[in-house]
Image: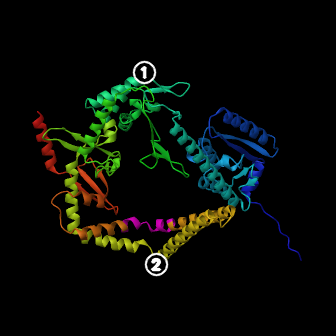
Amino acid sequence: MAKKVVRIDPVRQQVVRQLQPKKRVCAYCRVSTDSREQQNSFTTQMEYYTALIENQENWQFAGIYADEARSGTKLQKRDEFLRMMKDCEDGKIDMIITKSLTRFARNTVDSIQALRRLKEFGVSVYFEKEHIDSLSEKSELMLTILSSLAQGESESISTNNKWAAIKRFQDGTFILGTPAYGYTKDVNGELLIQEEEAAVVRRIFREYLNGKGTYAIAKDLSEEGIPTIRSAEKWHDGVIKEMLLNPIYTGNLLHQKTMTTQVLPFKRQRNKGQLPQYLIEDNHEPLISHEQVEAIRKIFEYRRKQMGMDDSEKYRSRYAFSSKILCGECGGMLRRQKIYIGKPYEKIQWCCRQHILDNTKCSQKAIREDDVQWAFSVMWNKLVSNYTDILTPLLDILKKLRMDEQQEQEIGDCSNRIMELTEQGHILSRLVSKGYIDPAVFIERQNTLTIELAAIKKKRSQLLDNNGFDQEITGTEQLLELIRNNPHVIEEYREDFFLQAIDKVIIQKNGQIIFRLINRLELSESYRKEAVEDDAKAYAHRV
């Protein structure tokens, strides 16, 4: 006898059909520039999709999400796209229509991640030009290939634009998009002095030559309400330094001071000799004389030597405490300050940036650098004297908690597979560059490798996250090696030990300094009493 089978739909789907019989459909539009032609395209897209959705009987219009003058290579800068994703997550949209994959995203990784996330929400994306529904079978492979082509097109466009800009650099026809502070430009792109801003520029150079520091100059300009560069909230000392070193104020124009990376995601960074620069002398009317600029250059060189700096050193690594010392009250970074300059009791201290800006928001007082150094020396000597009772048993406990042999094996297998897939990718690249395989075949195989590689890396990360003690074990082993190689207590502060052993220093208001070691172990020391007495003597000296 034949069996009778009755299909019973899920209750939720039945309720949804009853309450919401139509599919909620929205459209996504984007144009990458604000030119008149692109604006017309933008308006046309909006009108087209509004009519398209409203004319479908079984569709319900869910809105138009439109990003104007936005690049497709960075999703995080497209506000409307992010708002659309949030509405999909909240269950307000069932389907998205867009013109083509290039309108959706030109970055392969961003595109695939967004589509996978939408799949989790049950939202389909229909690409009109490609006739692809993201929820259909085998859609991901095709979309991955097309996304790669879109990304390659974007990179090609970027390369062509760079070539055109360099050509204009070389023949002196490049026109600045936004002139430097103190200048404006005429209809032909020639630089003209903007008198109101030029007065501020001259003041900055004059005050610096008279001995005022960049931080003090920036603070005064902000307090006086002087309009800032590109409508920033306030002046910063880094901006003042850039202005003091900018050759534009002497009438010279230097092109390609910054550069953009060759591949996605495109990043703007300072040109430190990777690419040639182009200097045009006597390009426009100067605001500052060459003699003033030369004097400022000498001041900068003198101060670098005083700080023990080299031009090649990074700003944040000038001092051992830079980016390491934190405020225990607000969590902000502490800033280095030199006080009583030129006096017998000249000192270096570190003060919370938030306290400097507004002491009502953070009451943490400054701490002397030698006080932190003294506390570190005391802490280090205690650790060296007792490491067998602290670090050795800690390492044994961490290893026991870490993971079992099977988990270790799985992590090892994942690492080996990652190396194999990476090598296969390199081989494919070499084959396609020599013309041994078709580019379409290369794209398909390369994307298959990319998907598997991402899955393996995710699995390994999950295994390591479940472990949770990898950093602690590695840090403890490094500390033990450092102490075994230097088993004696120190009589004075050792900067090399500090840099190798300390992750962060947290200054507390209760007179405690917390040293967070590289294995995340935190040890605290009190401020030394002599520091208070020294400050009292310095005050008596001044009086």
Q: In this view, does 70 lie to the left or right of 344?
A: right
The extreme right residue here reads: 1
Q: How many marks?
A: 2
User: Which residue position is annotated with label 2?
Assistant: 405
Q: In this view, does 385 lie to the left or right of 167?
A: left
Mark 1 residue type: Glu
Q: In x, y percent, where is residue 328?
A: 31, 48
Bounds of the magenta span? 461-473
Mark 2 residue type: Glu
Q: In x, y percent, where is residue 327?
A: 31, 47
Coloration mode:
rainbow
Q: In this view, does 294 lie to the left or right of 425?
A: left
Q: In this view, does 44 lie to the left or right of 401?
A: right
Q: Is residue 365 visible?
A: no
Crowd rating for badge 2 (residues with CA inside 10 Å; few <14, some 14–19, many 20+): few
Label whose residue precedes the other's in the sequence (2 or 1):
1
Magenta: main secondary structure equals helix
User: Which residue position is annotated with label 1?
Assistant: 195
Which of the two residues, 331 or 70, is positioned nearer the viewer here?
Answer: 70
